[in-house]
Image (spheres, rainbow, N blue to C red):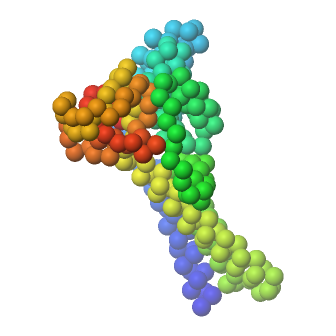
Amino acid sequence: MKKIYFAILFLISFLTVQAQEDVQTEPQNETQSAVSTSVIDAAQVKVEADSAYYREDYASAIAGYEQILQTGKESAAVYYNLGNSYYKSKDIAKAILNYERALLLNPGDNDIRFNLKLANTKTVDKITPVSEIFFITWFRSLSNIMSEHGWSVLGILTFLLALCMLALYIFARKISLKKLGFIVAIVSVCVCLLANVFASMQKTELLERDHAIVMAASVTVKSTPNESGTELFILHEGTKVQIKDDTMREWKEIRLEDGNEGWVPASAIEVI
């Protein structure tokens, strides 16, 4: 039985190494060359945009960062720098929008959170969130320690560790080593499962994108999706909302953190 377990572990390791070698030795085709050139161009544009930011030429910095994003090179660093540039230009709504996008890609970055909090102090609307069970708040905060990629990597590493500890439990002759292998394997499996849950949560947030920022200077929230609807309340630029109903093209049903709901023109908000 031990020989069978050993053979399985050896086969898994061999296939993993072989797959990595196949990827590394695969010849670069024209598409890959084009991507490499695009990466170089994006890197050069970022250097120029960063330089413009330090010269306090925020308009040029914004143009550079926006150009990078238009090529599909989405990253937390670019969104963060773009948010800083808009903040310096006193465009608070766009600053908040880009800080929020940066936070989606890198939720564990304290600098992004600090600057987002600072920008939110400049908004007119002060929304008090509905209280929730402390466990849910704690669980969400824990999931935001790392990004989807970070949790995925942790999940893989702890899974591999669990396999190693399982092998130690099976093949070790000393009782103390068997106990160590068993305990560490159980802990690793638990961490692996939790990491996968958090990675799934982060991925869902990235894919759904059901939050938006009010971009209009002010917008009246209606009770129905038309101009004749009853006026409920007014929102100002920079306020974060959740999109409840995205089925209509011209109007979106939104919900605030305090529970208030209503309809706003789609042109008044921009999805994070």
The C terminus is located in which quarter?
Answer: top left
In the image, is 14 to the left or to the right of 176? left
In the image, is 29 to the left or to the right of 239? left
Q: Position of residue 72 (x, y in %)?
A: 37, 33
Q: Which residue ends up furthest to the bottom in the rendered image?
A: 1
Residue in front for this viewpoint, 145 or 38: 145
Residue plotted at (45% across, 11% down): 59
Residue plotted at (55% across, 31% down): 116
Rendered image quadrant of residue 226: top left
Q: Position of residue 27 (x, y in %)?
A: 40, 45
Residue plotted at (49% across, 13% down): 89
Judge whether residue 58 can be spotted in this image.
yes
Judge whether residue 47 can be spotted in this image.
no
Residue in front for this viewpoint, 134 or 157: 134
The N terminus is located in which quarter?
Answer: bottom right
Residue plotted at (50% across, 24% down): 123
Total numbered labels placed on residues in the image: 0
In the depicted structure, whether residue 213 falls above or below residue 257: above
In the image, is 230 to the left or to the right of 210? left
In the depicted structure, whether residue 1 falls above or below residue 185: below
Residue in front for this viewpoint, 82 or 129: 129
Q: Position of residue 259 (x, y in %)?
A: 42, 45
Rendered image quadrant of residue 2: bottom right
Q: Position of residue 66 (x, y in %)?
A: 40, 22
